[in-house]
Structures are given as structure tokens and as C-alpha cells.
Image: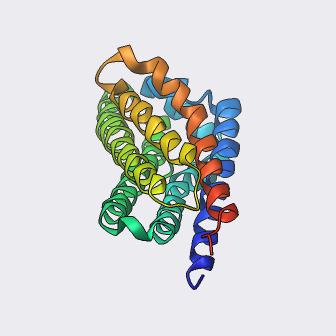
């Protein structure tokens, strides 16, 4: 198959992205109380961010870049599903927008938040109050609604359309497509956790399912070949 290398590269991108996500998530959980610390105040979060030094800043920078691996992965699915070009074009756009939104949300940590942490350490009580308001506003806008809400909505749309497209391709098992559709529904529900806490448990499950789904999808792109 002429486009086989692109499909394999897409599969590898999903797998590498998933494994890197687990590694970085685990590091931040152990060293930064992530993700629970996201609900903390500036007085709690900014000093801990600064105390982490260059290692913490580099980890957040790496974390912010990981969503970009979704784009070559989505290209791999696009090429592997020639029967659904229109649907997969929308899926590719959704994955690209979602990756960008997640990057923007996460990039606030090694950039704007890092600058806030430096300023916070040298400020008086009045200035700290202003910095806390900026910190909170950035978390709500860039974090909750751009990075998480918009990013996850787009990613759910990608998995849903990809799942439907995979069902139509004879080389892939039906369970793969339906599995992606089911995960997309869960991911869509979990994306509303910043609007209603009623779906927080679904979002927690999605954090564990996302890397698993990426590995399964990536491995399937590598393993299953078009039938001759």
C-alpha cells in the first residue's frame, strides 16, 4: 500500500503520545499533586510551581506539546479510511483544533504562570491579590474552557467520526470502530465537568481510558493491513 508508512507513523504517534502522557501525568501527580492542585489558589500553586525549578517548567512544556502528536495520528486514521474521506476530513480538522486548544491551555504553565510565580514571590500583599485574580482568570479561560472544554469536545468529535469510519473499513474489526464511538460519548460527557460537577467521575474514568484508547487505535493502525 503506497500510504502504508503514513498509517504506521500515525499509529506510532498515538502510542508514543499515550505513553508520554502517562509518564508526564505520573511525574506531575507525584511532584505537583496533579490534577488536584488545579483547584488550588495562587498562594498554594504558584510557590510550588516555582519551587519545582527548571525540571518542573520543562515537564510542563513537554506536557503542552504532547497533544500535537494527535495530529499525525489523525492523519494516519484519515489515510487508513479511504471509504470515508468527507467524514475523516472533519475528524482531522477536529483533531487539529483539539490539539491546538489543549496546547494553548497547557502552555500557560511554563509561560504565563511561571512569570506569575516569579512575580508572586517578590510581591507584597496588595500585588499578590492582583496576581491571584490574573491566575484564576487564566485558569478558567485558558485551562477550563479552552484547553479542557473546547479541546475535549473536539477530541470527542474526532473519536466519534473516526469510529464510524473504521466500521466501514473491512481490514479493521468492528469492535474497534464501535469502541471509539463509545469512548467518544464518554469523553463528550466528561468534557462538561467544568460546567457541572455531576460528570466529574466520568471525566476521571476518561483520564485512564484516553491513553488506553490511543494505544489500541495506534496498534490497530500498525497491525491491521488492507485485505488483498
Residue 67 picture location, percent across and down: 50, 55
- Relative to 114, is 46 above or below? above
Residue 219 occupies which quadrant of the picture? bottom right
| Residue beneath the point at 50% across and 36% down | 121
Residue 43 as seen in the image, left or right of residue 149: right
- Image color mode: rainbow
| Residue beneath the point at 63% across and 41% down | 212
- Relative to 63, is 209 above or below? above
| Residue beneath the point at 36% across and 14% down | 198
**Quadrant placement of the C terminus:** bottom right
Residue 100 visible somewhere in the drawing: yes
Count how many numbered circles sit on residues in the image: 0
Residue 136 picture location, percent across and down: 33, 31
Residue 104 as seen in the image, left or right of residue 170: left
Residue 40 visible somewhere in the drawing: no
Residue 5 as seen in the image, left or right of residue 143: right
Which residue reaches farthest top? 198
Nearest the viewer among 90 and 228 is: 228
| Residue beneath the point at 57% across and 50% down | 63
Residue 211 occupies which quadrant of the picture? top right
Which residue reaches farthest bottom? 2
Nearest the viewer among 47 and 79 is: 79
Which residue reaches farthest front? 228
Residue 36 as seen in the image, left or right of residue 82: right
- Relative to 33, is 101 above or below? below
Residue 177 picture location, percent across and down: 50, 47
**Quadrant placement of the N terminus:** bottom right
Amino acid at each position: 500500500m503506497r500510504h502504508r508508512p503514513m498509517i504506521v507513523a500515525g499509529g506510532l504517534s498515538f502510542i508514543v503520545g499515550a505513553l508520554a502522557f502517562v509518564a508526564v501525568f505520573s511525574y506531575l501527580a507525584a511532584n505537583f499533586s496533579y490534577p488536584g492542585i488545579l483547584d488550588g489558589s495562587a498562594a498554594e500553586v504558584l510557590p510550588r510551581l516555582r519551587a519545582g525549578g527548571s525540571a518542573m517548567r520543562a515537564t510542563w512544556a513537554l506536557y503542552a506539546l504532547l497533544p500535537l502528536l494527535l495530529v499525525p495520528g489523525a492523519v494516519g486514521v484519515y489515510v487508513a479510511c479511504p471509504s470515508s474521506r468527507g467524514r475523516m476530513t472533519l475528524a482531522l480538522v477536529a483533531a487539529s483544533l483539539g490539539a491546538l486548544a489543549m496546547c494553548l491551555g497547557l502552555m500557560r504553565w511554563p509561560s504565563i504562570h511561571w512569570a506569575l510565580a516569579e512575580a508572586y514571590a517578590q510581591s507584597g500583599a496588595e500585588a499578590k491579590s492582583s496576581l491571584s485574580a490574573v491566575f484564576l482568570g487564566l485558569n478558567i479561560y485558558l485551562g477550563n474552557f479552552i484547553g479542557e472544554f473546547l479541546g475535549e469536545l473536539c477530541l470527542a468529535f474526532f473519536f466519534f467520526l473516526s469510529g464510524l469510519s473504521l466500521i466501514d473499513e473491512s481490514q479493521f474489526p468492528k469492535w474497534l470502530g464501535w469502541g471509539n464511538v463509545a469512548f467518544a460519548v464518554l469523553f463528550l460527557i466528561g468534557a462538561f465537568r467544568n460546567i457541572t460537577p455531576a460528570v466529574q467521575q466520568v471525566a476521571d474514568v476518561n483520564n485512564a481510558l484516553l491513553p488506553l484508547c490511543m494505544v489500541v487505535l495506534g496498534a490497530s493502525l500498525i497491525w491491521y493491513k488492507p485485505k488483498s
